[in-house]
Amino acid sequence: MAMHTKMMQLFAEQGEERPEKPRTYGLTEIRGPSSAMIDGSALQDIFEMFGPFVDGLKFDGGSYSSMPKTFIKEITCIAHKHNVNVGTGDWADHLLQRGPSAFRQYVQECKDLGFDVIDLNVDSLMIPEENLLRLIRMIKSERLKVKPKFGIQFEAAAIPSKDRLFGSFVYPSKQKEMIEDVDLLIRKAERCLDVGADLIMIDADGVSTHSESLRTDAIAKIIGRLGLEKTMFEAGSPEMLEWFVGRYGSRVNLFVHHSHVGKLECIRDGAIGIIPSSLSQSHKHGPAIFF
């Protein structure tokens, strides 16, 4: 707790307005139990050390579906003791194949197990937009949070002609035609927010997977239209942590590996960070990063 107090004092000295938990920006979400199995004791250790800095815990890829319910409740209970929200991860698309009633039962079961957030991977759901909005309303009616995840590439056949922008980039693929359209992502995300979605997760694929292919133009447009408080980006490496905080400050919401939480907080409080001169201009992707 002494470390936590010191860091918060540093935020105040630097003019940052990152509040105590529960907060609505400057969020840090970490990946939870998966096939690699973070057990309850390991998770307890992480929260005892970094609990004040962690806002969310997300199960990996619906991994909880193969776990005993007693174990899931143990994990959600540990997280809640540290004021950490727990998300389901991507699993809803499997349930939708069984029909609306199965999805409603899934939402109720998630609530009973102690989940706070239901994650919806929009790309894998493959459902009409009106159905997606209906799912969001259903989840919100159970007083749970909902976080849709979007990528910048869409399958061409799934995009109504009225939504396809002139000049959208067609991504070559041997299997299916993909279209890269950041404006379409933003419009779909805005509709989700309008019906109650709490946060929009941006898929790292094609956006922020690697520093050498960082799409600064897409990130800037998404944040400019949706706002920092309503977006979360996956930062898969320490270099990405540094770039996001260096560009957008401590208010940016990030999804990171649990082993990067300590470094992220040091970057946020200014103890370590990038040097402005380390950014140079790239015509294709905007500022590129060299480390």
Image: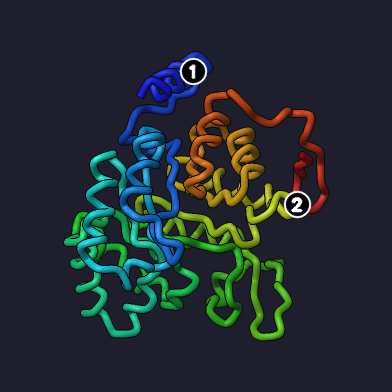
From what the image shows, is residue 218 above or below residue 124? above
Mark 2 lies on residue: 212
| The C terminus, quarter of image | top right
From what the image shows, is residue 247 above or below residue 214? above
**Percent x, y of residue 33:** 39, 59
Q: Nearer the viewer, residue 107 or 72?
A: 72
- Residue 138: quadrant of the picture: bottom left
Mark 1 lies on residue: 10
Q: Nearer the viewer, residue 159 or 122?
A: 122
* Helix, strand or loop for disc 2: helix
Callout 2, which amino acid?
Glu
> Outermost residue toward the front?
41
Q: Is residue 231 visible?
A: yes
* Helix, strand or loop for disc 1: helix
**Percent x, y of residue 59:** 38, 60
From what the image shows, is residue 158 above or below residue 150? below
Q: Nearer the viewer, residue 182 or 250?
A: 250
How busy is the neighbourhood of tag 2: few (under 14 within 10 Å), some, or many (20 plus)? few
**Percent x, y of residue 220:** 62, 45
* Number of callouts: 2
| The N terminus, quarter of image | top left
> Outermost residue toward the top?
13
Q: For this view, does 31 lie left or right of residue 82? A: right
Q: Is residue 196 visible?
A: no
